């Protein structure tokens, strides 16, 4: 984030606008909407400025800019369009310690005026840090279509009950829960639909129905974060992250996903790696139960899907046995997400009519699987957590009849910016893993479909000396 988004209160405060041409018109309209005391300096300008001046909406000094004009201003905006003149305005403002914006000159500006979605009192600012105003405008148009027209009315409605809610609910958490219930429920929908009288009656009833001394009810959402790309997070998962009091997260959860967590939520890391369990599973289970019983909304955040080798089933069983409210929010599992990112179909009419997900680690180390059943042709096998045992897994499959020349693909850091896809054959798996120095997280896809991995993919390593292997 290169700039800190800040909303400036300008009502009745002096703002200097230098310039009265086309570039200044949009700024005038924004400043008028904000209720600023607008001072314009320009020797000449558009007829619109004469109209605004005659109506008493601006004070227009028809002359050249003087650096002394910036004295006492809250903000300064330069819109002359002349390079020398704009630079003079920027220099005068900087010397006086006054925030300055020069239209289309981000290098001269100390603040940027964003593209704005106005649902007053709800205001959304969109900025590209001055790199592309057109892109910001397109984003604003998209957001405009998503937001209800009565959003401002809803904000004013909620504000009218703030004192009443504060009087009835003493704790911050209880107030936040109530507001979330109202915003997500039928009362807000009534306001947005124009049924404000009905909404007001329902709101009064809701406030008076529950006192703050009622016991808080906790809840746990077991959430799948997907294979790594934050944009693959589901909408429901995002909502859970925004509502959580506490997020308990695993090793494979990247910063991009954690950035979506509500900023004041507590975060506890419980990541595991092979032979390195920072927090044993039993302690994680006990933590979830204890925090929910304390009345907190907890998100148990897991990579991929929590019910595919994520031990989410064990955690759900423990929560239910303890009588704790819990739900599962599925995620895009690593197999489907990483394969799609690599351009690799897991099933294909010409190559594979079945797919099986297996783990490279069992309860006692070696996975307990039926190797003979997994060794047939036209069957895709996706191995999770199998890098450290890649050699023995390949040997088991070949011993049970899978052809040594069967195509394979290793997908490391799938869907992430540093994704690598390594293809070869089943018999070359040990040398591929060793030579390419494959690290976790990585999946191994075994089967004829692996030969369809995106042929244009550029790798960060050279496989020229690996026998039976081809880089794509």
Image: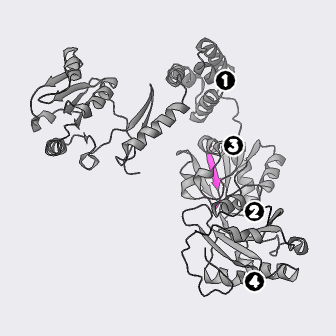
Give above or below for 14 relative to 99.
above
Which numbered disc, 4 or 1, marks the residue that appears first in the sequence? 1
Q: How far across and how far down the image is residue 217, in percent?
A: 71, 36
The residue at 57%/23% (across/down) is 165
Q: Please tell me which residue lies in front, 97 or 384.
A: 384
Query: Which mark sits nearer the N-terminus, 3 or 2?
Result: 3
Query: What span is in magenta?
Result: 244-253
Q: Which residue lies under the disc numbered 1?
A: 186
* Callout 1 crowding tier (Cα within 10 Å): few <14, some 14–19, many ≥20: few
Q: Residue at x 61, y 79 (%)?
A: 437
Q: How far from the left and from the top, in percent, is residue 50? A: 19, 19
Circles 4 and 1, Cβ within 8 Å, touching? The answer is no
Query: Can residue 126 be seen in the rendering of this structure?
Result: no
Asked whether the residues under the numbered discs 2 and 4 touch, taking CB atoms below 8 Å apart as contact, a structural biologist would say: no
User: Which residue is label 3 attached to?
Assistant: 294
Q: Is residue 160 left or right of residue 188?
A: left
Judged by depth in the image, the label closer to the viewer, 1 or 2, is 2
């Amino acid at each position: 984030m290169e700039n800190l988004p800040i909303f400036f209160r300008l009502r009745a405060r002096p703002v200097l606008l230098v310039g009265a041409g086309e570039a200044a018109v949009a700024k005038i309209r924004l400043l008028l909407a904000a209720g600023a005391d607008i001072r314009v300096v320009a020797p000449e300008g558009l007829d619109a400025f004469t109209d605004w001046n005659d109506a008493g909406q601006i004070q227009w000094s028809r002359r050249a800019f003087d650096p002394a004009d910036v004295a006492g201003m809250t903000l300064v905006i330069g819109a002359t369009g002349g390079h020398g003149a704009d630079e003079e305005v920027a220099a005068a403002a900087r010397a006086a310690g006054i925030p300055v914006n020069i239209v289309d000159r981000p290098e001269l500006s100390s603040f940027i005026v964003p593209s704005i979605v106005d649902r007053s009192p709800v205001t959304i600012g969109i900025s590209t840090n001055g790199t592309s105003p057109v892109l910001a405008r397109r984003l604003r148009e998209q957001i405009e279509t998503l937001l209800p027209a009565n959003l401002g009315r809803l904000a004013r409605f909620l504000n009218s009950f703030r004192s009443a809610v504060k009087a009835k609910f003493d704790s911050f958490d209880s107030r936040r829960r109530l507001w979330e219930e109202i915003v997500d429920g039928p009362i807000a929908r009534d306001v947005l639909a124009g049924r404000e009288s009905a909404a007001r009656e329902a709101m009064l009833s809701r406030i008076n129905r529950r006192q703050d001394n009622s016991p808080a009810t906790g809840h746990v959402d077991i959430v799948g974060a997907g294979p790594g790309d934050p944009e693959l997070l589901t909408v429901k998962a995002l909502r859970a992250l925004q509502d959580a009091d506490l997020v308990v997260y695993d090793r494979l959860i990247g910063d991009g996903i954690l950035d979506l967590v509500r900023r004041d939520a507590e975060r506890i890391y419980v990541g595991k790696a092979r032979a390195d369990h920072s927090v044993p599973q039993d302690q994680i289970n006990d933590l979830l139960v204890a925090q929910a019983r304390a009345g907190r909304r907890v998100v148990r955040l897991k990579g991929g899907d929590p019910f595919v080798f994520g031990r989410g089933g064990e955690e759900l069983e423990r929560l239910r046995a303890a009588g704790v409210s819990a739900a599962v929010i599925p995620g895009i599992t690593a197999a489907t997400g990483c394969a799609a990112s690599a351009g690799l179909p897991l099933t294909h009419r010409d190559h594979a009519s079945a797919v099986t997900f297996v783990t490279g680690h069992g309860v006692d180390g070696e996975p307990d699987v039926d190797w003979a059943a997994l060794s047939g042709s036209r069957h895709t096998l996706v191995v999770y957590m199998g890098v450290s045992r890649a050699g023995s897994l390949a040997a088991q499959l070949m011993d049970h009849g899978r052809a040594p020349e069967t195509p394979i693909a290793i997908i490391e850091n799938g869907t992430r910016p540093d994704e690598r896809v390594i293809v070869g054959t089943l018999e070359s798996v040990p040398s591929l893993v060793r030579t390419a120095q494959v690290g976790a997280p990585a999946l191994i896809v075994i089967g004829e479909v692996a030969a369809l991995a995106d042929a244009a993919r550029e790798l960060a390593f050279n496989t020229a000396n690996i026998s039976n292997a081809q880089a794509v």
